[in-house]
Amino acid sequence: MTIRLERDVEQGEINGLEDLEKPLILEEKIVVISDNDETDQDQEKTAGSIGMVLLCTFVAVCGSFEFGSCVGYSAPTQSAIREDLNLSIAEYSMFGSILTIGAMFGAITSGRIADFVGRKGAMRMSACFCITGWLAVFFSRGPLLLDVGRILTGYGTGVFSYVIPIFIAEIAPKNLRGGLTTLNQLLIVTGSSTAFLIGSVITWRGLALTGLVPCIFLLVGLCFVPESPRWLAKVGLEKEFQVALQKLRGKDADVTREAAEIQVYLETLQALPKAKLFDLFESKYIRSVIIGVALMVFQQFGGINGIGFYASETFASAGLSSAKIGTIAYACIQVPITLLGSILMDKSGRRSLIMISATGTFLGSSLAGASFFLKGHGLLLEWVPILTVSGVLIYVSAYSIGMGAVPWVIMSEIFPINIKGIAGSLVVLVNWLGAWTVSFTFNFLMDWSSSGTFFVYSGFSVLTVLYVAKFVPETKGKTLEEIQKIINS
């Protein structure tokens, strides 16, 4: 499951007051211009006390870790759950994939929830959904309660996917915002890897209980951190806004200029006209929309959610003597590669990184497909497990370095500010639908043809390289206006 790290946030280019009725969208920064250069120095001083900002970030990314735990749960538990509850392939496929259905509804409603009850309120609500879902999974004795629990955790993670990066972006000073927002993606991957590792040594019911831990940390931690000052300003709580901002920047910090920036930005955003769905089909927007939707289709139909959700069973079907070894290797490789990808994001171009990543996923899925082809024909059987594990690890490494994050970065850069909300919502919907389709059909495809499944995924990787090379512009270092000129030329 891919969670975006919006480029606007990473560069510290926003104050975090976007169209909160549209999930997962970030707007451009409105700058207050000063004739005195000393104001920039004054602003840097407001970051002098970062203890509370770091505490807020640590508390928030407990939700990111929870997101990863939910995503990683199904991979190491498939055989045990099917055996204990006597589930068919169809029933387990529904259990594994229904997380994305819940997450889709969570993402769609997250903007309104975060706007109505605040960032902290949205995180509390999400944690309660996840706790209820994990308990339902733990006590389940059949597929019904199992699915109910899974969709509840999915809904919680869908809300988390929006509110956590927004909360961090809104509470962090500009000079720390980029580094702190990257922790969201890192903790998602860490949570997923941890679930893989722990699930290799404890029962599936025990693993469900471990999902409660980050939720408890989050609920307790939220009692000690302030609400987002930008949300407080948006809803007109002026006194609380000033108190929260002062608490975040330190009691001796001068927050006058930052408070003024927030107020001006809020007034400007409220004056912008609201875009409608049919506006996206205008000639000046349609190419941007097609690029955003296509990148999400290629990202998902490359097979990441099928391979990730059911990695353990894939290794077992390849004949690996201990599927846990492959699962542990899968878990260990994600975190360092994701870190490397975040470093390369600013050093290489978007197009080159995504094409290199897609080439890697092609090689990985082709190698895994070839291993199952050999097994099906009784050839080189002793090499089949090694080739399968190698192919999957190459695939996940390549995906983590580019295909996971870059499509979201490009999406945040190609849409003009006036359609970012509605266009981003459409792109996110396509992404979640693709995630559900791939995760639900994976086991059926593997029954049809294990080698064919991976060759289909490798085909989408090839299409990704060709499409990006032909139609996707390089957005690194370009202004929004320059990007639009390139797209529409």
Image: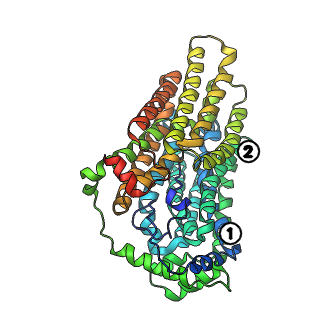
The mark nearer the N terminus, 1 or 2, is: 1
Question: Does residue 129 appear in the picture of this structure?
Answer: no
* 300 vs 209, nearest the viewer: 300
* Structural crowding at the residue carrying mark 1, measured as other residues with C-alpha within 10 Å and reported as few (<14), some (14–19) or many (≥20): some
Q: Quadrant of residue 84?
A: top right
Residue 222 point in image, percent of width and height? 63, 72
Regarding mark 2 in the picture, which secondary structure is present there? loop
Residue tagged 1: 54
Q: Disc 1 residue type? A: Leu
Q: Is residue 463 above or below residue 85?
A: above
Q: Residue furthest right?
A: 201
- Look at the numbered discs 1 and 2 and tell me whether their residues touch, using CB distance below 8 Å: no
Q: Please say which color scheme the image uses.
A: rainbow
Type of residue at label 2?
Ile
For residue 344, above or below residue 374: below
Does residue 285 lie above or below 47 as drawn?
A: above
**Labels in figure, total:** 2
The label on residue 375 is none
Q: Disc 1 and disc 2: Cα gap in Å?
A: 33 Å
Pinpoint residue 49: horizontal percent, then vertical percent.
70, 77
Q: In the image, what residue occupies the spot 47% across and 40% down?
A: 299
Q: Residue at x 52, y 68 (%)?
A: 122
Give the residue at mark 2.
Answer: 202
Name the one closer to the observer, 414 or 333: 414
Residue at point 49% right, 85% down?
Answer: 237
Q: Residue 28 falls in which quadrant of the image?
A: bottom left
Across and down, in percent, residue 205 comes to: 66, 48
Answer whether residue 367 is visible to the viewer in this image: yes
Q: Nearer the viewer, mark 1 or mark 2?
A: 1
